[in-house]
Amino acid sequence: MKRLIAFLTLAGMLTIGITNVTFAQDEVQDTSAVETTDTTAVAEEATPVDEGTTVMEEPLTEESKSFHQVLKEKFIEGSPGFMGIVLVCLILGLALSIERIIYLNLSTTNTQKLLNKVETSLENGGVEAAKEVCKNTKGPVAGIFLQGLDRTNEGLDVVEKSIISYGGVLMGRLEKGLSWIALFIALAPMLGFMGTVIGMIMAFDMIAVVGDISPAIVAVGIKVALLTTVFGLIVAIILQIFYNYIVSKVDSLVNDMEDSSITFVDILAKHANKNK
C-alpha cells in the first residue's frame, strides 16, 4: 500500500511539474508580449509616420517560437484525445521507472565488504553477531545471508535450499513493475498507429464529402496521422531506454546475489568445520 501511494504521489508530481512549467512559460511569454507592446507604442509615438508610408509587419516565424510553443501546438493539432492518452502512458511509465531505479539503487550493497564483516563476526561473536551485521545492512544480499544464518543449526543442505528459495522471492521483488513498463512501451506506439489509421479515415471522409482530391483537403487528416505516430514512437523510445537500464541493473544485482551466496556458504562450511 505504501508503494502504491508513493507511486501515485510520484505520478502526480510529474504531472504537476509539467503543468507548472507550462503555466510559467506562458506567463513569461505574456509578460514579454506586454513589454513588446509597450515598447512598440512608445516608438510609434516618438517616430512620426508619413500618411503615404505603408508599415510592414513582420510575420511570426517558426524560428521565433519556443520549443514548448511548437510542442504544444503540435500536441493540439494531433488530436488531444489520442495525444492525451499517449501523454498519460509517458507519465505513468516514467513514474514506474523512477520508482524502480530508486528501489534498485537502494538495494545495491557492497557484497565483498558485507562478506568480510560476516566472516569476522562469525569468528569473533558467532552466529548471533553475524545476524546483527545482516540486520543492520540494507539490501537483498543481507536478507539472503540472514535467512541462511537462521538455518545454520539444520545443516548446510538446508541452508542452501533456503537461500535458493528466498533468492527467488527477492528476484521477484526486484523485477516488480517491469511488466507494466513493458506494457506502456508497447501501448504508446500502438495508440500512435491507431491515430494514424483514424487520421487517414478522416482524410478519405473529406475526399468523399468534397468529391475532389487536393492537398488542402487531406492535409488535416494526414497531419493527425503523422503526429500521433511520432509522439507514440517518442514515448516508446524514452521508456525503452529506462526499461533496458532497469533490466541491466536487476541482472547485476542477481549476479551479485548468486556470487555472494556461494561465498557465504563456503564461509559457513569453514566455520562449521572449525567448531567440530
Image (tube, rainbow, N blue to C red):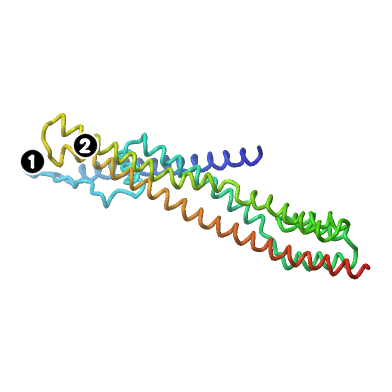
Q: Quadrant of the C terminus?
A: bottom right
Q: Residues within 10 Å of mark 2 (few under 14, many from 20)?
A: many
Residue 67 image point, x, y percent? 34, 50
* Residue 34 as seen in the image, left or right of residue 147: left
Q: Residue at x 64, y 59 (%)?
A: 254
The image position of residue 224, as x and y in percent, is: 28, 40
Pointers 2 and 1 in contact (C-beta within 8 Å): no
Around disc 1, counting alpha carbons within 10 Å, would you say few (fewer than 14), some (14 to 19), or many (20 or more)? few
Left or right, residue 5 beside residue 216: right
- Residue 199: image x %, image y %? 27, 38
Q: Which residue is more in the foreground, 260 or 221?
A: 260
Q: Is residue 86 above or below residue 121?
A: above
Going by the picture, which residue comes out furthest to the front? Answer: 157
| Residue at figure coordinates x 19%, y 39% from the top left | 218
Amino acid carrying label 2: it is Ala
Label 1: element kind = loop
Residue on which disc 1 sits: 51
Q: Secondary structure at mark 2?
A: helix
Q: Which residue is mark 2?
A: 203
Is 142 on the left or on the right of 230, as rendered?
A: right
Comparing marks 2 and 1, which lies closer to the viewer?
2
272 or 55, nearer to the observer = 272
Identify the residue at horizontal 67%, vertical 63% (top origin): 256
* The residue positioned farthest toward the top in the image shown: 209
Residue extending farthest to the left is: 52
